[in-house]
Image (cartoon, rainbow, N blue to C red):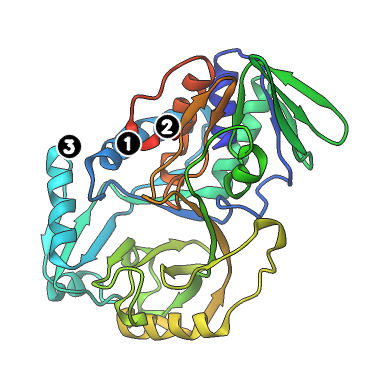
Amino acid sequence: MGSATAWQLAHQGKEVAVLEQFGLAHNRGSSHGSTRIFRLSYRTSLYTDLAARALTDWRELEADANQKLLEQNGQLDHGYQEAIDEIAASLDRHNRPYERMNASEAHARWPGMNFEDYVIYSPDGGRCFADETVTTLINRSKELGAQVHFDTPALSVELDGNFAIVETANQTWRTPSLVVAAGAWVDKLIGNIVKLPDLIVDAGQPAHFQPIASLAAESYWPSFLHHGANGRGGSPLEASAYGVYSPGEGFKVGTWSDRKAIDPDNRDFAISQHHLSEMKEYVSHWFPGLAVDSAVATTCLFTNTPEEDFILDRRGPITVCSPCSGHGFKFVPTIGKIAAELALGGQQSTPQWQLPA
């Protein structure tokens, strides 16, 4: 989100400096990896509307960079009826195309997957190329005049009247407009000077699986969300899950039952064999087209608000652009645009994204 905000501001000719505590496209946060799901199939109109706006903004970014960063290869949602009905209603309100079908009809089209009874397919959905996007945003920001400082963690942030003071190991920055897009570190960095909601930082453990030879074509593998009856609890087979095909890596599958709370500064990146076993059980049941024993697991950070909304708001000289509750990447260029507007003095009118009073 920070790189997208920098790109938007640099495009407007503003003086921009980016401070990144790690390197380019690192694996310590929530935005690394080759792909992320793009979808308009939300149960609430707020995010369907934002995704529709983002679709336009992705095309603007692609034109600016002359690079393909979003591919609309389709999105499947399946699960219990209430969830699918709400998705259909949200898509209807925004006049977006979709198809509804039952489990057998969906399996006939995508034989590598099994489905619950209620299925919806959105051709607007697909995948974002995450690492390429971050690299592109940083490179374009630099080309437009932004300073980018890697391996430069902010050690502290303080307020001095209408200015924010940022201390790094080698320099003190004084600015009338500071954008904090620190993800899992946002509370550590500014929690003492900006009132934040209660944040939950945890690590998920998705895994990539290889398709069987007869289903190796990418056309068999649209992005998906499984709205499990037990949500984030229950047995592995009843868990809510997500998936997206990553070229060269396979089909990534993750569930919401595999997370553990962590301190982002003391993360061991260890793979839980228990969770991997549960993931294999899930894939064995729901994905007959994936080779279960091909699993390669990884970990990634999620930083969530209690309602799994975003924080996009401003207090004094500080614009807060974190967290995005595990579903923000699809909105990257649009969140960058909103954060840039806030940084230049705009006001946040969406209650779900406002900071606590």
What's the residue at 18%, 69% (across, down)?
A: 106
Q: Position of residue 355 (x, y in %)?
A: 45, 33
Q: Which structural element holds mark 3?
A: loop
What's the residue at 49%, 55% (across, down)?
A: 35
**Cα distance in 3D space between marks 2 and 3:** 18 Å
Q: Quadrant of the N terminus?
A: top right
Q: Which structural element holds mark 1?
A: helix
Q: Nearer the viewer, residue 118 or 173?
A: 173
**Cα distance in 3D space between marks 1 and 2:** 8 Å
Q: Residue furthest right?
A: 170
Q: Is residue 308 above or below residue 58?
A: below
Q: Is residue 112 left or right of residue 263?
A: left
- For disc 1, the marked residue is 50
Q: Position of residue 138 (x, y in %)?
A: 64, 34
Q: Nearer the viewer, residue 283 or 68?
A: 283
Q: Position of residue 40 (x, y in %)?
A: 28, 46
What's the residue at 11%, 70% (across, down)?
A: 102
Q: Is residue 164 left or right of residue 133?
A: right
- For disc 3, the marked residue is 94
Q: Nearer the viewer, residue 323 or 121?
A: 323
Of the numbered discs 2 and 3, the one sitting upstream in the chain is 3
Q: Position of residue 137 (x, y in %)?
A: 58, 34
- For disc 2, the marked residue is 334
Q: Could you tell me the amino acid type at mark 1? A: Leu
Q: Could you tell me the amino acid type at mark 3? A: His
Q: Which structural element holds mark 2?
A: helix
Q: Is residue 91 left or right of residue 332?
A: left
Residue 133, picture quadrant:
top right
Q: Mark 3 Cα within 10 Å, few/some/many (few <14, many 20+)?
A: few
Q: Is residue 349 above or below residue 149?
A: above
Q: Could you tell me the amino acid type at mark 2? A: Thr
Of the numbered discs 1 and 3, the one sitting upstream in the chain is 1
